[in-house]
Amino acid sequence: MNDSGQEQIYLHTMLTQQRQAFEQEPFPSLAVRRDRLDRIGRLLKNHRNELCEVVSRDFGHRSSHETTMLEIVPMMGSLRHTRSHLRSWMRPERRGRSIEFLQMSNWVQHQPLGVVGIMAPWNYPLLLALGPLIDILAAGNRAMIKPSELVPETSALLAKLVAEYFKPEEVTVIEGGVEVAAAFSALPFDHLLFTGSTNVGKKVMAAAAANLTPLTLELGGKSPTIIAPDYPVASATQDIVFGKLMNAGQTCIAPDYVLVKKDKLDSFVEAFFEQVQRFYPSATGSAHFTSLVGARAHERLLKGLNECRERGIDIRTVDIPLPKSGLGLQPTLLINPPADCLLMEEEIFGPVLPVIPYNTLDDAIAFVRSRPRPLALYIFTHESETQQKVLEKTISGNVTVNGTLLHIAQNDLPFGGVGPSGLGAYHGYEGFKRFSHARGIAKVRLFNPARLATPPYGRFTALLARFMGR
Ligand code: NAD
């Protein structure tokens, strides 16, 4: 048998093993779930340095501050939040009943689904592999994780650590390349969570459809940022540079492009240069700026920039020290690029920021509305009518007002995309519900009202039908 045949058998064996273990314990107690969550916490705390080091090696270079602040810290917060609310989330939710059914009681019980598959991308390789695990284990499930082949050292360490902290029938990590990922997506999981690009998301959805596997898709897209006319440009720029240059722009919810009022364009460019140099001064810049994950990502961005250069688009590059290892790219602005250039058609996923000048706020809103629905949207304004107008007239997975990225760190907000940027949301209570089956339960107490409507039918049934059908 060839390697791919053996891999398939291994994947099916792991799934069967997890499913059998789930059948033995279909509704884990609060204590069991909390213990599983605590083990994720211990794994992260005990191996923080090792995890930061392997991520940096896989990227070429990434500051341990970024790995800690953007991956480990949010998971620790999410663990604390989930642990403290889990008892109430697991409680049955009482539901109402109509007057005809006063003799009944109704409730919803969130029931574990079984075995959930997690497919993670490379850009936040810890957060997007272990973060969903928090919601999945809290909901009482078991999980198989397929990390990205583009971060092989991180995937290997995750596999080793998960095997130390969890039994394989609780959680297991499957390493391997694209063929393994494709086979993984075709497994008949009870739910599959895919985080990655929209193109691969389509393939994963097609594979899941063959088994009718319920799916959550966390995809990408071009997240717009609007600086409304009333908002101080320098202040907005500080938050935009932060959101754009974390992880060198390789963030699914990074501001992809900025819409700024025409007469503020020069102030924006000036503020951008100042802010980038303040964040990445010559003494520490190379240590704090992240490399691009691989040659493919680097080439894609260079190709986009070359196209802009050939088409005479105004390109402004901020000269900062690049990381000493890996492939770096200087933070770059594209001034008013046309809609049909590569970098305005594709998600940028790098430290390049197109700036589009607008005449009126309605023009800026129309620009956003004319494009596929994005994963995130950022609006900077102090005016509540402007905020309301933008919120009502645009659609996106999430929004942060007067900041960037912050919505992802809120434990009590659903996180996810809409349309081409994703399907379904998780995090906190929404995550617990996403990976549970909301089972509606109706209980007859003293008297079963259906007994009033049994044959042989007569005048009473007719009266009852008239009352109920009123
Ligand atoms: P990707 O789509 O290339 O890969 C994601 C996963 O899919 C990997 O685990 C990979 O092994 C697997 N895969 C690759 N080819 C496959 C195939 N043919 N069949 C099945 N699986 C396959 O994405 P990426 O480059 O790792 O990550 C970047 C993308 O992810 C960006 O578009 C970004 O916006 C998106 N993203 C989204 C979120 C979110 O939460 N919505 C978070 C991070 C990244």
Image (tube, helix red, strand yellow):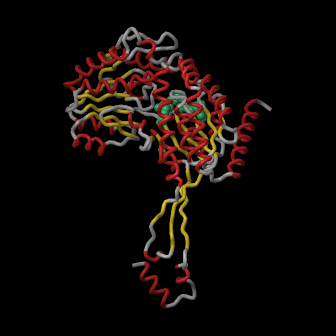
Rendering coords of residue 90 (x, y %): 53, 53
Residue 369 in view of the camera: yes
Q: Is residue 277 left or right of residue 440?
A: left
Say how many tags the image has.
Answer: 0
Residue reaching furthest to the right: 1
Quadrant placement of the N terminus: top right
Residue found at x 46% / y 25%: 250
Looking at the image, in which quadrant does ligand 1 appear? top right
Q: Is residue 27 above or below residue 347?
A: below
Quadrant placement of the C terminus: bottom left
In this view of the protein, which residue sits in the foreground, 284 or 417? 284
In this view of the protein, which residue sits in the foreground, 415 or 334? 415
Q: Is residue 233 above or below residue 98?
A: above
Dividing the picture into quadrants, the one containing residue 329 is: top left
Residue found at x 33% / y 14%: 277
Q: Is residue 440 above or below residue 80?
A: below
Residue found at x 22% / y 28%: 232
Dividing the picture into quadrants, the one containing residue 171 is: top right
